[in-house]
């Protein structure tokens, strides 16, 4: 089955700096890679996703890159703000028609004002 | 994205009692919903797939007689934790697929269960 590794487990950055979270996956059949943000006591919120036919996707301060050959994908948050503090999870699945998401262990991001 | 509502958001119960958690898809019908469990500071683990009009599919290691799932309508799935024990204390989260078989999953706000 799929195995998703996520690093780092914790990350502290100064407000305004960039944050990068990296994930690797094992199953070459995976082609859908979402990122979720989970605030304390709440459910995960889908913030961005990427499919294997795309190398990079950007939405305002958030971007995701995918290297399918190396089987890794990354989340980039620029100009971080205190409200970006949360736990971020990466995940992988075979995409269309498959909802079997395999999650990484999460990264706790702290943005220091 | 899909709007998913869970109720209750938190519940405390005595050991041996049963607790029901509801998950509703508010903006479109969902023939399939998913139930996850999350222990403190850990990732999400899929427990079961809820199928409208048929039996749920459980992941390996999840007791189907303990975690009863009912998907009676296209907008409602319920998870009942039967004869709850302290080790069942966890954060239970349901999710609903986005429209169009894209692979997107949208999660509810979760239900915190504490068993005394």
Image (tube, coloured by chain):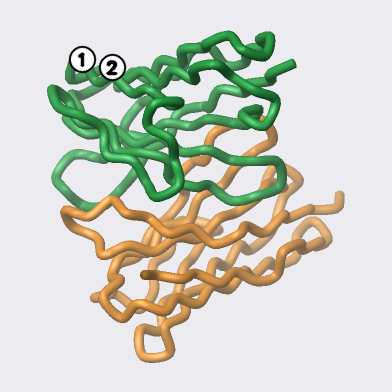
Residue at the limit of the structure toward the bottom, as seen here = A69
The relative height of residue A20 versus residue B11 in the rendered view (above or below) is below
- To which quarter of the image does residue B70 belong? top left
Q: Colour of chain A?
A: orange
Q: Are marks 2 and 1 in contact (CB under 8 Å)?
A: yes
Q: Which residue is mark 2?
A: B76
* Left or right, residue A108 beside residue A20: right
The relative height of residue B48 versus residue B52 in the rendered view (above or below) is below
Tell which of A78 and A106 is nearer to you. A106
The relative height of residue B69 versus residue A91 in the rendered view (above or below) is above
Q: Which residue is mark 1?
A: B72
* Residue at image location 20% in from the left, 31% down from the top: B51
Dots 2 and 1 on the same chain = yes
Front: mark 2 or 1: 1
Q: CA distance from mark 2 to mark 1?
A: 7 Å
Q: Colour of chain B?
A: green
* Left or right, residue A17 beside residue A92: right
* Residue at image location 36% in from the left, 70% down from the top: A1
């Amino acid at each position: 089955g799929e195995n998703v590794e996520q690093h780092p487990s914790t990350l502290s950055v100064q407000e305004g700096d960039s944050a990068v979270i990296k994930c690797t996956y094992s199953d070459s059949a995976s082609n859908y890679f979402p990122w979720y943000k989970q605030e304390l006591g709440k459910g995960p919120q889908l913030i961005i996703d990427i499919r294997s036919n795309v190398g990079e996707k950007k939405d305002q301060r958030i971007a995701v890159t995918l290297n399918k050959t190396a089987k890794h994908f990354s989340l980039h948050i620029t100009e971080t703000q205190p409200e970006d503090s949360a736990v971020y999870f990466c995940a992988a699945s075979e995409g269309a028609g498959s909802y079997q998401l395999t999650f990484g262990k999460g990264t706790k991001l702290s943005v220091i004002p | 994205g899909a709007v998913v509502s869970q109720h209750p958001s938190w519940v405390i119960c005595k050991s041996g009692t049963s607790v029901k958690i509801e998950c509703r898809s508010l903006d479109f019908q969902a023939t399939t919903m998913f139930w996850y469990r999350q222990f403190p500071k850990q990732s999400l683990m899929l427990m079961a797939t809820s199928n409208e009009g048929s039996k749920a599919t459980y992941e390996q290691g999840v007791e189907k007689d303990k975690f009863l799932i009912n998907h009676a309508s296209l907008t409602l799935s319920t998870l009942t934790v039967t004869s709850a024990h302290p080790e069942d204390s966890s954060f239970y989260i349901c999710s609903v697929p986005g429209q169009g078989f894209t692979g997107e999953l949208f999660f509810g706000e979760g239900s915190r269960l504490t068993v005394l």
